[in-house]
Image (cartoon, rainbow, N blue to C red):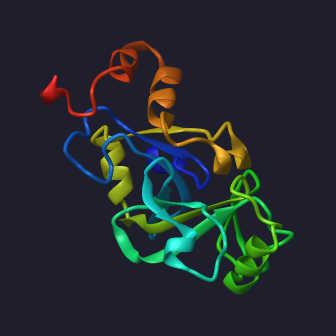
Amino acid sequence: MISEKLKKGHLLIAEPSIIGDLSFNRSVILLADHNKEGSIGFIINKPLKYTINDLIPEIDANFKIYNGGPVEQDNLYFIHNIPELIPNSVEISNGIYWGGDFESTKDLINDGSIHKNNIRFFLGYTGWDENQLENEMQGNSWIITDNTYKNKIIGKSATHFWKEQIMELGGDYLIWSNAPENPYLN
């Protein structure tokens, strides 16, 4: 059963057939929570043109901001791999944590204790109601994989991440690894 395969910490790789969806075309999503009520995740490979300093001027750092998904895009979220420094964070899995005390986080970034390989910021998140993600899985919208990068995924370059994941799948997916983002423009 698909819902038994879905677990927080897994990666959801957009099937190449998702074309024209600005949020999800060529997306890789870290599943941050999955339960009987629904699922939440963050698109980890869609950087925006903003840095954390652009959004919060009192933070003296140029960490990129990512498009986390189409839900609540006016809210800032973050994942990290340093729970010993950021109180009140919640473990997703594999040493990846979600949120925590933001005031402490700001201070730790400003004093140089947190580096870009420790934290990733998102505007918005992806969300699915009860059974919605399972239905999308049955409709072949997503490929589930383990997060083999564990907490090092936070520092992973987003530039070619979807392509790398598709190439790792191999087989029929290889042809898509070099296809243009919109094959109709080919």
Hey, which quadrant is residue 115 in on the image? bottom right
Look at 21% across and 33% down and name the residue there.
182
* Residue 88 seen anywhere in this rendered image of the structure: no
Look at 27% across and 41% down and name the residue there.
139
Q: Is residue 173 above or below residue 41?
A: above
Q: Is residue 24 above or below residue 178?
A: below
> Which x, y percent locates residue 178?
35, 20
Q: Count the numbered circles shown.
A: 0
Hey, which quadrant is residue 103 in on the image? bottom right
> Which x, y percent locates residue 163?
44, 29
> Which x, y percent locates residue 121?
56, 65
Q: Nearer the viewer, residue 146 or 164?
A: 164
Look at 45% across and 35% down and name the residue there.
162
Judged left or right of residue 134, residue 5 is right
Judged left or right of residue 118, residue 123 is left
Hey, which quadrant is residue 87 in on the image? bottom right
Residue lying furthest right: 84
Query: What quarter of the picture does the C terminus occupy?
Result: top left
* Residue 62 seen anywhere in this rendered image of the structure: yes
Q: Nearer the viewer, residue 19 or 47?
A: 47
Judged left or right of residue 88, residue 38 is left
> Which x, y percent locates residue 92?
66, 61
Q: Is residue 14 above or below residue 124?
A: above
Residue lying furthest bottom: 103
Look at 52% across and 43% down and name the residue there.
158
Q: Is residue 116 above or below residue 60?
A: above
Judged left or right of residue 158, residue 27 is left
